[in-house]
């Protein structure tokens, strides 16, 4: 180590004077160790991120594998023959699961949970059980109907999730990032194991329904938080997003939002559901309100004359949060409106013009599903 980091001297000549700078062996060692630690920390973070992604992928693959191994009709027939009472208890557990999921369903999904006769393996189970154990025929039919409901809900949840993901992509948002973000939300509570069978296991089809519901909910919640309401009258836009001539020094400048002109005191509306994260004076923005919408989305409202919201308020798109003014670096009363994704300013027009149509199409999901039937 001493041979690698000997004391080093450098000299500098300036205005006829020579100055010597000594870098000690100790300083070099400390610097080298610091660089190594930083490099190791970066490598560790990459490994952790990679493992998390691999683990999530492995979990999905494992579940798909277990879905392929659901009980065959012969296995279920054996279960009925071993102990009909245990089968009845299993069906009670499954019904509790379905009822618990039903409580979480959006209102429009509750209308579409019609019980239909099953087909395939479940139908074969009904036939075989009815022939072998006539007294258990009704239990077999109940089991088949439960599976039909679960599988139908899973397909519907997957369909809605696919539509929501496509809508997010139209708005240049990453659906996978939305899912990861939802999984990192603060959560906790006592552990209450979930099982659908007496042996403590969960039928993969029921587990798949839970995962599909979680994905659908995360994506649709993200859509509801997308800026979609104009914060002021759209026909009053006076300056767009992009390069323009600065109104003060007349030089080229980047304008990172939209300006809406209006009289002082004209109401300003929240562009989407969210939580107020900043209220106060912000440099050239003057009186400013910022709303955090989740998934890295934030909207900023500047040059306000008054505040109608405070930090921590939960607002709904269209709520009044303040009024137009001319505070900060402003030539006259107007609203400066920004949309930022992970701190980067993006053009608000694509949200205000595209999001309402995209969301209207998504909200037609129940109607489209009904027509499909």
Image: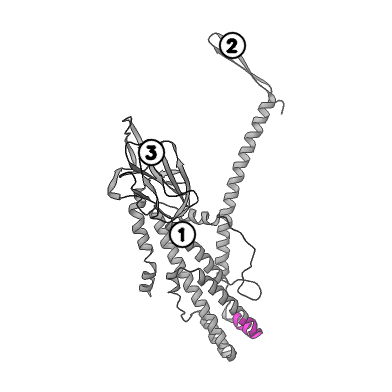
Q: How many marks?
A: 3
The reply to whether dot 3 and dot 2 touch (C-beta < 8 Å) is no
Circle on res. 221: 1
Helix, strand or loop for disc 1: helix
Note whether 313 is above or below 90 in the view shown.
Answer: above
Q: Position of residue 321 (x, y in %)?
A: 41, 50
The residue pinned by badge 3 equals: 327
The residue at which mark 2 appears reads as: 18
Residue interval drawn in magenta: 75-88
Residue for point 47% across, 45% down? 278
Within 10 angstroms of label 1, few (less than 14), some, or many (20 or more) residues?
some
Is tag 1's residue or tag 3's residue first in the polypeptide sequence?
Answer: 1
Which residue does the image show at 62% across and 84% down from the upper left?
80
* Residue contact between numbered discs 1 and 3, judged by CB atoms under 8 Å: no
List x then y, in percent, for residue 178. 48, 55
Viewer-side label of 1, 3: 3
Is label 2 or label 1 in front? 1
Residue 48 appears at what percent x and percent y? 60, 49
In primary-sequence order, the first of circles 3 and 2 is 2
Q: What is the C-alpha distance between the residues marked 2 and 1?
A: 67 Å
Residue at 68%, 29% (x, y): give it: 29
Where is 95 relative to 46, above or below? below
Based on the picture, tell me whether residue 81 belongs to the magenta stretch. yes
Quick one: SS at disc 3?
Answer: loop
């Amino acid at each position: 180590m001493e041979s690698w980091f000997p004391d080093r001297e450098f000299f500098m000549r300036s205005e006829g004077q020579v100055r010597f700078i000594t870098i000690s062996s100790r300083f070099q060692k400390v610097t080298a160790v610091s660089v190594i630690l930083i490099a190791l920390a970066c490598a560790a973070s990459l490994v952790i991120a990679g493992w998390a992604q691999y683990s999530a992928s492995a979990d999905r693959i494992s579940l798909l594998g277990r879905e392929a191994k659901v009980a065959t009709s012969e296995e279920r027939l054996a279960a009925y023959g071993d102990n009909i009472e245990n089968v009845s208890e299993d069906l009670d557990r499954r019904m509790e699961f379905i009822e618990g999921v039903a409580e979480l369903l959006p209102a429009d999904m509750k209308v579409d949970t019609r019980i239909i006769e099953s087909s395939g393996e479940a139908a074969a189970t009904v036939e075989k059980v009815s022939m072998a154990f006539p007294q258990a025929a009704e239990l077999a039919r109940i089991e088949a109907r439960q599976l039909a409901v679960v599988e139908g809900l899973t397909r519907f949840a997957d369909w809605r999730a696919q539509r929501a993901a496509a809508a997010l992509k139209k708005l240049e948002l990453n659906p996978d990032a939305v899912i990861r973000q939802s999984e990192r939300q603060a959560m906790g509570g006592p552990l209450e194991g979930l099982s659908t069978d007496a042996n403590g296991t969960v039928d993969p089809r029921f587990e798949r329904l839970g995962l599909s519901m979680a994905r659908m909910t995360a994506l649709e919640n993200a859509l509801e938080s997308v800026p979609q309401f104009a914060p002021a009258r759209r026909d009053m836009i006076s300056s767009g997003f992009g390069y323009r001539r600065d109104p003060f020094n007349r030089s080229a400048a980047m304008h990172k939002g939209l300006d809406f002109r209006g009289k002082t005191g004209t109401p300003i509306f929240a562009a989407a559901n969210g939580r107020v994260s900043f209220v106060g004076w912000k440099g050239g923005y003057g009186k400013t309100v910022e709303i955090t919408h989740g998934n890295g989305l934030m909207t900023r409202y500047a040059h306000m004359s008054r505040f109608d919201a405070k930090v921590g308020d939960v607002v709904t798109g269209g709520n009044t949060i303040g009024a137009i003014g001319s505070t900060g670096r402003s030539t006259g009363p107007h609203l400066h409106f920004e949309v930022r994704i992970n701190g980067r300013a993006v053009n608000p027009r694509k949200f205000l013009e595209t999001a309402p149509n995209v969301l209207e199409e998504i909200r037609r999901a129940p109607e489209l599903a009904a027509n499909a039937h």
